């Protein structure tokens, strides 16, 4: 069940010994690919704080996202990118507005970033169709006058539409920062829909499709805002050593930028390999008559291959069958934010959609080199789990 395990373990449960399939086995650029970039670091002796490699990565991302120069700032992680964007949009919590409205269906980083800026969380439910906060419902909240910031999340990389949230900000005056951690692929494909005035924070964690190990960025058409976010990522410094804004240290090192640049070089090949694996999944689930239960790219980010169980009972059956066959799976967001020990006591709305949905979305294995045999084995285990119940 460990996404980071690269060792194939052996399943000795049955008479046949088949290797365990890890839920996610990332593959980042090889040492050979990194070497030319590492030599550039040796030559410049610049290791961080927007050295040449980080600047080149930002420039390339701007072009990829059809943003003007200065529309992307790199960060040390998705969480630091989100934190700096919150600090820039809303500052630290102060006065009467102390609430950050966050969806229950998200990775804990959304909540951790808001808390680190001093905000009190208010956990809201998601829409059953989009799996996201609904701007209309948030605009109608009775506690909106206490809200300092709203953090819509792109769940599993399903993109958050800019236009609706921009309209929300204009109508309510409440700042909005989008946690688009897993939207690199969507933003590459449809930048006009996903990027715009509202800052979008992305993650380049090893488990995301575009990965630098640890890393992230914020993207927006408002280059002045992006510049301020860069300042918040660097102790509030801009052009001098005077700390002038709320801040953190959230800069991307040159070593991580090197991984990003090397990955952009091989990005087309990575995408082709990804498409092949997703085709195998679609074909396999199609043959099993389960095509409508599979949620995978491009609807969500490519690393999320989700089996959508119709009931909790069904999810339990499939989970048990996968486990018996040595196939790792994961509830990527657990059972929702409200179920994590740290957030159990948080003020929250009733969460019927998240409570019902989160435990039914089983994350199946993904790797760019997952082979046909493995995908068939996964499909068979899912089908067996359904039949048995
Ligand atoms: C991955 C992720 C993050 C955190 O990104 P890090 O780079 O690990 O800090 C935040 N929010 C969501 C929804 C994520 O999936």
Image (cartoon, helix red, strand yellow):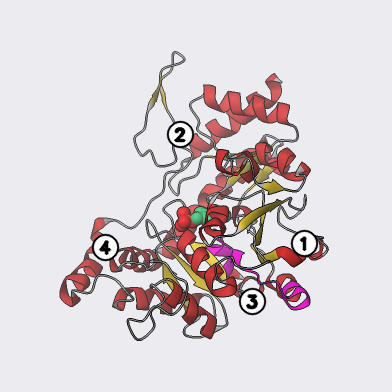
Sequence-earlier tag: 2 or 1: 2
Q: According to the image, label 3 marks what residue?
A: 192
Measured Cα–Cα span from mark 2 to mark 1: 41 Å
Q: According to the image, label 1 marks what residue?
A: 138
Tell me residue 195's x, y (percent): 61, 74
Mark 4 secondary-structure assignment: helix
Measured Cα–Cα span from mark 4 to mark 2: 28 Å
Measured Cα–Cα span from mark 4 to mark 3: 32 Å
Residue 173, magenta (yes or no): yes
Residue 160 visible in the shown view: yes
Tell me residue 139's x, y (percent): 79, 66
Mark 1 secondary-structure assignment: helix
The part of the chain drawn in magenta is: 168-187
Is 309 above or below relative to 297? above
Mark 3 or mark 2: which is in front? 3
Instruction: Identify the residue at horizontal 50%, vertical 79% (top origin).
Output: 226
Sequence-earlier tag: 4 or 1: 4
Q: According to the image, label 2 marks what residue?
A: 21
Q: Nearer the viewer, residue 291 or 254?
A: 254
Tell me residue 194's x, y (percent): 63, 70
Q: Is label 4 in contact with label 1 (beta carbons under 8 Å)?
A: no
Mark 3 secondary-structure assignment: helix
């Amino acid at each position: 069940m460990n996404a980071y395990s690269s060792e194939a373990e052996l399943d000795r449960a049955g008479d046949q010994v088949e290797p365990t399939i890890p839920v996610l086995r990332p593959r980042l650029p090889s040492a050979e690919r990194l070497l030319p970039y590492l030599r550039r670091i040796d030559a410049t002796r610049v290791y961080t704080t927007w050295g040449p490699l980080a600047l080149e990565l930002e420039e390339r991302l701007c072009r990829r996202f059809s943003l003007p120069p200065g529309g992307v700032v790199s960060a040390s992680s998705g969480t630091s990118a989100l934190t700096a964007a919150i600090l820039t949009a809303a500052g630290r919590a102060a006065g009467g507005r102390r609430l950050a409205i966050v969806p229950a269906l998200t990775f804990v980083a959304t909540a951790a970033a808001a808390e680190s800026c001093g905000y009190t969380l208010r956990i809201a439910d998601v829409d059953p169709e989009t799996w996201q906060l609904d701007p209309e419902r948030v605009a109608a909240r009775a506690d909106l006058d206490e809200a300092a910031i709203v953090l819509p999340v792109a769940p599993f990389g399903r993109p958050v539409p800019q236009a609706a949230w921009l309209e929300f900000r204009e109508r309510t005056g409440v700042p909005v920062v989008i946690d688009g951690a897993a939207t690199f692929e969507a933003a590459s494909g449809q930048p006009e829909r996903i990027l715009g005035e509202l800052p979008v924070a992305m993650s380049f964690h090893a488990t995301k499709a575009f990965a630098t190990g640890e890393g992230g960025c914020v993207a927006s058409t408002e280059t002045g805002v992006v510049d301020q976010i860069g300042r918040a990522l660097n102790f509030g410094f801009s052009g001098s050593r005077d700390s002038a804004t709320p801040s953190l240290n959230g800069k991307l090192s040159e070593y991580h930028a090197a991984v990003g640049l090397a990955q952009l070089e091989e990005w087309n090949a990575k995408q082709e390999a990804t498409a092949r694996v997703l085709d195998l999944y679609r074909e396999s689930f199609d043959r099993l008559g389960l095509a409508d239960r599979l949620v995978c790219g491009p609807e969500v980010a490519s690393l999320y291959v989700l089996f959508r169980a119709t009931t909790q009972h069904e999810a339990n059956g499939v989970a048990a069958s996968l486990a018996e066959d040595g196939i790792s799976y994961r509830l990527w967001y657990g059972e929702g934010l409200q179920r994590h020990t740290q957030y159990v006591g948080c003020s929250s709305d009733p969460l019927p959609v998240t409570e019902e949905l989160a435990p039914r979305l089983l994350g199946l294995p993904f790797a760019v080199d997952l082979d046909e045999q493995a995908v068939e084995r996964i499909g068979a285990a899912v089908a067996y789990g359904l039949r048995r119940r």
